[in-house]
Amino acid sequence: MIKLSKRLQTIADLVTDGSRIADIGSDHALLPVYLVQSGKSPSAVAGELPDGPFLAAKKQTAEAGLKSVIQVRQGDGLSVLNPGEVDTVTIAGMGGSLMADILEAGWRSGKLAGVTELVLQPNVGEDLVRRWLISKGFVLQGEMILEEDGRIYEVLHAWSASHLKLNHDNEWVYQTSILSVDMEDETKTEWLYRMGPYLLRQPSELLTKKWQFELGKLSRICQQLTLSEAEESRGKEAQYRAEMKQIKEVLACLPTVKPSSS
């Protein structure tokens, strides 16, 4: 059986057993091949747009002897799908803005009809993906954070609200009371989107590490801004320092977080 990276294995583990999947931006089709080989998915669609990854996906599928159950299709985003032919969509390895655009285009064109599960791994801009999910009635069921090759990744797992039989919904997921900080609810909600409501409920060293890195980046930006005499720079510096203050406050209220005193 094909061996996946830690990042792709995390995604694969979240896919529901027995679901027909579509992997968008599938690259070498490693994820669909693994899911079918392992018996977790009966069939799959691997979507790619550039010629190179598309041909690589076709080769991988053929070498695995799975051409009859994995369809490799060339096209932009969810355009490769027919409504109702898959249960789960996975998208990984791209920015959150692009991912949200792909999902929105698929939603508007009806390509997500019948899709009940989404497993998404944005490289950056995770908050944009969370906002898209809630705007379309998808409810986060969990979030994972992992580190591989020096990079920290978040994986979001969501179900369509219309197919849920659970006792919580988006209102529960984004409950601001989980943050015991002196902020307006609107500001708390913003940080739930940015940091992840499940990740904040069960904080980890990796979550701390990710946001300490962000603090360092913002600090360096502020240092650069102090060298500028432009009035606009003063405003930006104040904005970034306020953001840093809020990050530190959120980290400080989490039980396992020990923010730097610098």
Image (cartoon, rainbow, N blue to C red):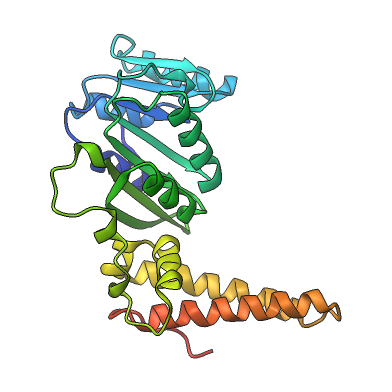
Q: Position of residue 176 (x, y in %)?
A: 32, 70
Left or right of 102: which side holds 121? left
Is 85 located above or below residue 89 in the figure?
Answer: above
Q: Residue at x 46, y 72 (%)?
A: 187
Q: Position of residue 262 (x, y in %)?
A: 54, 89
Q: Position of residue 51 (x, y in %)?
A: 58, 19
Q: Residue at x 43, y 83 (%)?
A: 249
Q: Is residue 26 in view from this perspective? A: no
Is 177 located above or below residue 54 in the figure?
Answer: below
Q: Residue furthest right?
A: 229
Residue 228, located in which quarter of the rendered image? bottom right
Front one among 34 and 112: 112
Q: Position of residue 142 (x, y in %)?
A: 26, 53
Q: Residue at x 38, y 30 (%)?
A: 30
Residue 138, located in which quarter of the rendered image? top left
Q: Is residue 29 in view from this perspective? A: yes
Left or right of 17: which side holds 153? right
Front one among 120 and 31: 120
Q: Residue at x 51, y 54 (%)?
A: 125
Could you tell me how many numbered marks the image carries? Answer: 0
Screen quadrant of the N terminus? top left
Is 55 located above or below residue 134 in the figure?
Answer: above
Q: Residue furthest bottom?
A: 261
Front one among 29 and 233: 233
